[in-house]
Image: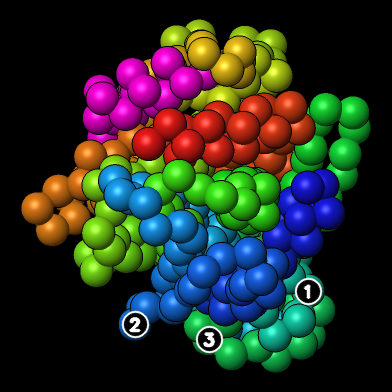
Amino acid sequence: MIETIKTLTEISGPSGRETKVRNTLIEMIKDHVDGYEVDKVGNLIAWKGDGGNPVVLVAHMDEIGIVVTNEIKEGFYRIEPVGGVSPYTALNRRYVLQDGTVGVVGVERETAQDVKKNLTNLSFDTLYLDTFGKKVDVGTFGVFDSHFYQNGDFLVSKAMDDRIGCAILVEIVRGLKNPKRRFYIAFSIQEEVGLVGSSVLAYPLDAQEAIAIDVTDSADSPKSFKRHPMVIGKGPAIKIKDRYSISDKRIVDKLVKVAKDRGIPYQLEVLTFGGTDAAALMRTREGIPSATVSVPTRYIHTPNEVVGKSDVENTIKLLIEYIQAV
Ligand code: CO
Ligand code: ZN
């Protein structure tokens, strides 16, 4: 499992540029599923089993990143965020572009007054990517240049959002040999720019239920967000609601029952911001009842997103038991 997480999080796959992630996932799952296909826009969908009441589990392949907008002068480029990247997070970071170029983000600082002004109200208008003289094309995408690190139960990497969800789906399909119902695992594109892939991926499926697997804010560091109850190490978070969706109550109740019956630790999540693919799945065709199971995560949308190994293992357990509960 750790190897799967390390491999998946270290791939570069910003929104709209998910090809490498998709190809790696196909290699990881192809011998463990009954079939798979890539739809017209690039979502990867695989299936297994043939019992009734099919469920689709969805994780997004893409990660936040940057894109080069224009050249300022040779070797210096203006960039734009892809998905939710704060300029404060981007500043002074090392990025690797999809053509292999490595660059560092700096800020304009011509006068002391500029520095003060630019830093108190930081914007991508005054940030630049320094590529050390290397020429890059407008429209080149990039991601944080950041590597996987483990310290006991803590797993640290860029793109835990949402390769951890992808890794969970890979482990489910490898671990569940005789599913009691058909289930789909789907890997969506462009979640970070507005739930794009998940808006269409379930359309051709006969799924009766959908569950998105994604990260959520954990509030277990000093003075973290008081109103968020999620903590790393206390189990998967069964989402009640976030800004974009309210989980289907029947699925939530079933998840809680399965967790209690099987002695799997869990937490209940009410997130005051954010959204997941569940919001789009709920709106598919005549509607698919949907919910989200989340992995509590520190420092979301930074190069060092932190999750708990035991939470990941318990999420896999919970979802396998959920599928089997039909
Ligand atoms: Co995200
Ligand atoms: Zn996500």
From the viewer's perspective, tell me whether residue 167 is left or right of residue 138.
right
Nearer to us in this view, 240 or 314: 314
Residue 92 visible at all: no
> Is residue 286 depicted above or below 292 in this figure?
below
Q: Which residue is mark 3?
A: 138
Q: Which mark is residue 102?
A: 1
> Is residue 290 depicted above or below 94 in this figure?
above
Nearer to us in this view, 59 or 289: 289
- The span shown in magenta is 239-259
As for residue 94 lying within the magenta part, the answer is no
Counting residues from the start of the chain, the first of labels 2 and 1 encountered is 2
Q: Residues within 10 Å of mark 1 (few under 14, many from 20)?
A: some
- The kind of secondary structure element at disc 2 is loop
Q: Amino acid at mark 3?
A: Val
> At x 44% / y 67%, what residue is drawn?
45
- The kind of secondary structure element at disc 1 is strand
The mark lying in front, picked from 2 and 1, is: 2
Counting residues from the start of the chain, the first of labels 2 and 3 encountered is 2
The mark lying in front, picked from 2 and 3, is: 2
- The kind of secondary structure element at disc 3 is loop
CB within 8 Å, label 2 to label 1: no
Q: Which mark is residue 40?
A: 2
> Is residue 69 depicted above or below 149 in this figure?
below
Q: Amino acid at mark 2?
A: Lys
> At x 62% / y 72%, what residue is drawn?
30
